[in-house]
Amino acid sequence: MESRLDRFTYDDAIVRKFVTATIVWGVVAMLAGLLLATQLAVPQMNLGLPFTSFGRLRPLHTNAAIFAFAGNAIFSAVYYSSQRLLKARMFSDRLSAFHFWGWQAIIVAAAVTLPLGFTQAKEYAELEWPIDIAIAVVWIAFAVNFFGTIAKRRERHLYVALWFYIASIVTVAVLHVFNSMALPAGWLKSYSVYAGVQDAFMQWWYGHNAVAFFLTTPFLGLMYYFLPKAAERPVYSYKLSILHFWSLVFIYIWAGPHHLHYTALPEWASTLGMIFSVMLWMPSWGGMINGLLTLRGAWGKVATDPVLKFFVVGITFYGMSTFEGPLLSIKSVNALAHYTDWIIAHVHSGALGWNGFMTFGMLYWLTPRLFQTSKLWSQRLAAAHFWVGTVGMLLYIVAMYTSGVTQGLMWLAFDKTGRLSYPDFVETVVRIIPMYWVRAVGGALYLTGVLMGSFNIFMTWRSRPKTYEEIIVEAAPLGPDNLPKRAEPTALEKAGVHVFGRKIDYFTEANWHRLWERKPFKFTVWVTIAVLVASGFEVLPTFLIRSNVPSIASVKPYTPLELMGRDIYIAEGCYNCHSQMVRPLRAETERYGEYSKAGEFVYDHPFQWGSRRIGPDLARLGGKYPHLWHVRHMENPRDINPQSIMPTYAWLLSDDIDFSVVQQRVDAMAMLGVPYGDAVLTAEKTAREQASLIAREIEEQRGPAGLGGKQIVALIAYMQRLGVDIRTPVAEPSSPTANANKQGASK
Amino acid sequence: MSSTSHGDDHVYDGIRELDNPMPTWWVALWFVTIAFSYFYVVHMGEDGSGVLDAYKVAVNEQAARDAAAALALGDVSESSLAVLGKDPATMTQARAKFVSTCSVCHGERGEGGIGPNLTDRYWKNCEGDLVGIHRTIDLGVPTRGMPAWGKQLDPIEVRKLAAYVGTLAGTNAEGGKAPEGHEVAVRK
């Protein structure tokens, strides 16, 4: 065996690239976040420009934080640790470079298109279809490179970190492909192939599992490599690794519907989402326990080593947010928390605490090694970063809890006569503005910490050697896998697995798993099966069983102009502040009107239910205000409502509707099965007619003249349509609408 | 190392993997969550325990409360509203409410803006009678942008506002919006 050793090098240059990108995008993402935070406290910070308004920038912030900052951190971890765990250089340097530059190009494309209003309007999946395709291509390149490296490995068994990487790579691909299915209607415009309830279901199956397989499993892999390395302690429990790995992979997938409690989603799905979230608590904590117990005997080191400090707090935040997740998935807790800042607190304890701190722990350990300087430029600056970051994060999270619970309780509060205590929505906004300031301060502190870290790493980089030393590694080649028995206790094999007791032994000793670890293909297939089976059980019934989306006869497709208005609503990112989903809670139906029914959304490609109510729900907006009210309100919300924090949208009064694309968009909708009938032939003409009709009505209301071709008119057409289809028309008491209403109310 | 340890083959890039048993409390809590889920599903299977059932109960309770309150307040009538309009203290209160709630659309003095002028003698939705004004405010004109205030305000508040709007009629506020609807002769 020791006869012949391979001599090779690891590709650390690619890791250095990913590390640099992590830091740069981290700063960008957090700067965007800070701007958004101040915009909510001072709406003038929207600057009155389309590109800088909250609705367009918020997706930029989330995408940058998740895919640019955390993404590049993951790739740094994967490229550094996999090569060493597999004792092999990456499969192809070309693919590595393609992966790196491709990913950065995607991020730049996102940073350009999102502020310009090109979006698919599904959270964390906003990027338009050409970029979606690019993501798939780059991801496949990454997968080939990664699995190629596994194929040429010199280590027989796959270490637990690699299991997590495998699960992440496979599942993210599946999620991305299925959720992003869209029909193009132009180069940077498309409509989700799913509508309404189904689109919502797909989106939150994706959204939830993006948290699982982009922000959790890869970071657990990172933890399993860098934590024992930094602590110089053995990993606590192999069996715990196995159990929490497989249970995470299988159970996570089911939990998505907890994002849609009390919505028009069928209740069975919501219940499934809740119970699987509850059962997910311990599997998540398995990772935390294995991490923290790995530090047994190293706690003295934690007190002095900033790397371990970051890891310990990061893992603790992981534990906190994975306890909070199941809690928030309990329906009655969710009734209070959903749509409020509590969720913002929750995701930031994950993002800042877990992803952020794990990333910086890794970077502080990694960069002196990558830059071949024996140590970090300043340990004290790193420790200062730790404290500033921790304080900033705590301020942020406490502020958002306070604001979330406060606003949630205000929305639900009734006075003694049973009327809403705070019928005016803005009252509930004004109350939390002080918390928005605290959040902004907390965020600024956290960012300060990140800047300190960037400077520290920059200074470390400056003392690098002139040329990096190419370190030669030696390892024996693997050869054919003709030793399947070697890892088994031979006694077991001899006795034969037919003996029941032996079988149990085989199972509890995890020997079966030990076998899988030497068979990456089999391992990957099982992970894929776990993910697909769980997804199938969860998602398919909503598509296959018609009774899950009872149709409502009076619900008709949007007119061409309304569709254009809806596209403006999407482009401006109104869904980032407004929901369109009235929950069946009396506090909501009193405030907004009849609760939303599944059948109302059958033509909504994509759905626009929203996830946070910074402004009020708009599901029943149609007819609530005269056109002129909307003109004034969009021009400057503070003219109508002095305390409003909504951005101004004055450009909608001067920008023209692009009538030339109307036909194309209606055609795309028709192709998706929206029954336009003959109307599809005259889309542009119909749109123009409706636009001039509304413009005339605005003039009659003594509003400004000449709005006929302006975007505001299309948006108003859409807003006036919202929720009116199921309203009983006063004039025709025996219309099908009345029946639909009755059915809805009695179910 | 005292902990149970694998042989050398559980070492990866210098990281050793121990095989300690899983913490008992961890396993136990996991079973508890699984048991909870089981009982939850069984319970939710029962009739009347769904989200919409709870909603219906809440709506019925409120209907009962509203009915009791309506009985206590007595009927809405021209005379009961007129009485409110004659009390200066009540009208001062109502004016404040009007300014804070209605002026966005009707102007501070009722001169009109997004909504119609309330200080002329033209009406779109009633004959200028207090009961009719009350009905408009209470139920709104949903198709034309006048909100239904009965859903948001206390019933007594709506009555006071109706009485207040009644006092505005014919005051012809300066800079008022052009009349809408039909003219109604002076009453009283």
Image (cartoon, rainbow, N blue to C red):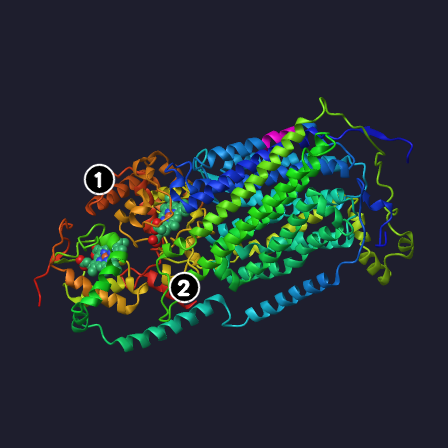
**Closest to the observer, A671 or A125:** A125
- Residue ranking furthest to the top: A466
Q: Chain of mark 1?
A: A
Q: Residue at x 54, y 56 (%)?
A: A257
Q: Are marks 1 and 2 on the same chain?
A: yes
Main secondary structure type of the part rendered in magenta: helix
- In the image, the segment drawn in magenta is A96-103
Q: Secondary structure at mark 1?
A: loop
Drawn side of residue A93 relative to residue A620, left or right: right
| Residue B145 visible within the image | no
Check disc 2: other Cα within 10 Å, few if <14, some if 14-19, many if 20+: many
Please state the horizontal and vertical placement of residue A68, each as a whole percent of the image: 57, 37
Please state the horizontal and vertical placement of residue A217, each as a whole percent of the image: 66, 47
Number of numbered labels in the structure image: 2
Q: Quadrant of the N terminus of chain A?
A: top right
| Residue A437 visible within the image | yes
Query: Which label is found at residue A705?
Result: 1
Question: Badge 2 is on which residue?
Answer: A587
**Closest to the observer, A684 or A481:** A481
